[in-house]
Image: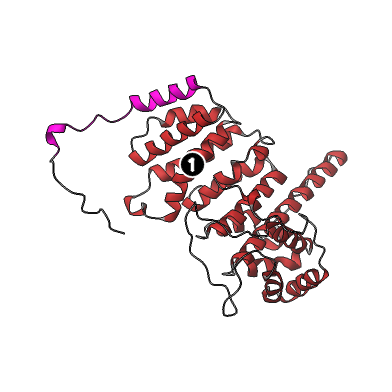
Amino acid sequence: MADTSDLRRGATPPGALRNPKIDAAIERAVQLGDPAELLALLDRSSGLPARRGGGRAPGPDLGPNAPLPRVNLDLARAVGAAIADRGAPAERLVRALCSSAEEYALIVAAQALAAIAAQGAQAQGAQAEGAARSGRPPRARGGRGGLDPLGELGQLAEDPRRVVRDGVVAALRAVIAARGDAVVGELSSWTDGYLQAYVALEALAERTLLAGLSAGAEVVARLEEAFAISDRSPRADERLQGLRLLRQGMPAQIATLAGRFPEVVRWLEEKTQAERPESRDVVGQAIAALRKGSFSDAETDRLAAALSATAPPPRDPSRIVQGTRKRSKGRR
């Protein structure tokens, strides 16, 4: 499971922007709604490969085990926070960053959205505290200028490039840290798509973050939704990157979530009844991941036995035609 905290630690401290040239470029970008100058200034420090021909074309996703560029995530966080600090006038710039094809622009956009969401949570908390003191109910607050940070992040989560998704995972973790259990429920809007569901579970499956959450039932609900779209997926989706990534990521994610919430283990035991082979593979790999963790042999043996007990009967050997070959072998 990729840990976005392993992305490059740059010279810029998280949440602090100390470069006056970048700060001035942000101000001009906010006024113009055009990130081109800002991105050109950030390009050398982004940690991503240099531009070619004046722009950086979208790169392919190289798979879960391919080495990532050493992205300067701290710089992206600092720039994103500085953009969010500009308030409503920065909305046009954030939207422009979200519509860019460049990886680092999208990573910066994700961090800006996370900062906007965190600021909204702080403002709501202050308003609720003031209302409690005055005895008046808090007034409803809309999103900044109609910008929905969590919804926009969900759109970025569908990017096929792994480096962008990891940036979104880092941003979503910042939102969860700021808003807590409430966000876990809102992530139900993410679990109807393969890549979004993967990113949502990946963001949740971080031990330090989980220590501050108590919404075990909501975590199980997100797991159930993600497992269901994988289990019920049409055969035509088998080659889709999102479906493959979701199935590959779930076992380790389940094991991490189970370490915080015991109800996840009970949910996994129910899934030993799954019939689809691909879903049973996910369950079996999740049990193996639990075994490698801090779970007792007795508990993992019980889960493995439950999975074995529901295995389909073996094919009748007398009906297997020997000497046939798999015609799909070697095809790409």
Q: Quadrant of residue 167?
A: bottom right
Q: Which residue is mark 1?
A: 250
Query: Could you tell whether 245 is left or right of 148 in the image?
Result: left
Q: Residue pushed farthest top?
A: 298
Residue 298 in magenta?
A: yes
**Badge 1 local density, few (<14 within 10 Å), some, or many (20+)?**
many
Magenta stretch, main secondary structure class: helix
Residue span colored magenta? 297-320
Query: Could you tell whether 305 is left or right of 59 in the image?
Result: left
Residue 212 in magenta?
A: no
Q: Position of residue 144 (x, y in %)?
A: 72, 60
Question: SS for tag 1?
Answer: helix
Q: Position of residue 67 (x, y in %)?
A: 54, 56
Residue at image point 58% right, 37% down: 218
Residue at image point 28% right, 31% down: 312
Q: Quadrant of residue 92?
A: bottom right
Total marks placed: 1
* Residue 260 sits above or below residue 110 on the image: above
Which amino acid, by three-letter code, is at mark 1? Met
Q: Position of residue 106 (x, y in %)?
A: 61, 63
